[in-house]
């Protein structure tokens, strides 16, 4: 919605308002762990492992109760050659999966 407002304000040539809403969009996206997770997936798909690592680590700082984030982190760490970190992430993902089944 905020992005659409920014586009609308640009079309109306209200560039200051458009800029304000674009900044809000940027801020909300940066705070959303699932947006960061999607960025990490895209970076991994493009073989940009440093960027994938950055995004998934940022996502995990904001959301540490979703096994999908830990599974992606495991994949990224494995591709980076950090097998111990990858194993740790897989164990966390498995623990969360068990917790979700029982709870």
Image: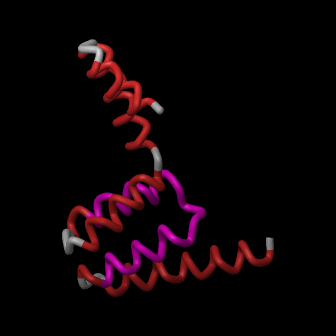
* The magenta segment: 52-78
Q: Is residue 42 left or right of residue 94?
A: left
For image coordinates 27% across by 82% down, the residue present is: 79
For image coordinates 40% across by 79% down, the residue present is: 74
Number of numbered discs visible in the structure rendering: 0
Query: In the image, is residue 61 part of the stretch drawn in magenta?
Result: yes
Question: Residue lying farthest right?
Answer: 103
Name which quarter of the figure residue 17 lies in.
Answer: top left
Is residue 20 shown above or below 90? above
For image coordinates 27% across by 21% down, the residue present is: 11
For image coordinates 37% across by 79% down, the residue present is: 85
Q: Position of residue 63 (x, y in %)?
A: 53, 56
- Main SS of the magenta segment? helix
Q: Position of residue 30 (x, y in %)?
A: 38, 43
Q: Pick whichever, 58 or 38, lies toward us.
A: 38
Q: Position of residue 53 (x, y in %)?
A: 29, 66
Q: Pick whichever, 26 or 102, lies toward us.
A: 26
Name which quarter of the figure residue 13 lies in.
Answer: top left
Is residue 26 shown above or below 76? above
Question: Residue lying farthest front?
Answer: 11
Which quadrant would the C terminus be assigned to in this image?
bottom right
Query: In the image, is residue 37 part of the stretch drawn in magenta?
Result: no
Q: Is residue 32 left or right of residue 44?
A: right
Is residue 90 shown above or below 37? below
Is residue 94 shown above or below 103? below
Name which quarter of the figure residue 47 lies in.
Answer: bottom left
Q: Position of residue 4 (x, y in %)?
A: 40, 31
Q: Pick whichever, 19 or 36, lies toward us.
A: 19
């Amino acid at each position: 919605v905020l992005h659409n407002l920014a586009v609308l304000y640009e079309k109306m040539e209200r560039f200051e308002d458009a800029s304000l809403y674009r900044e809000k969009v940027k801020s909300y996206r940066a705070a959303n762990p699932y947006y960061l997770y999607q960025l990490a997936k895209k970076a991994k798909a493009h073989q940009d492992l440093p960027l994938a690592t950055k995004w998934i680590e940022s996502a995990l700082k904001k959301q540490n109760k979703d096994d999908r984030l830990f599974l992606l982190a495991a994949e990224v760490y494995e591709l980076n050659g950090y097998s111990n970190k990858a194993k740790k992430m897989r164990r966390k993902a498995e623990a969360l999966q068990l917790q979700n089944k029982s709870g």
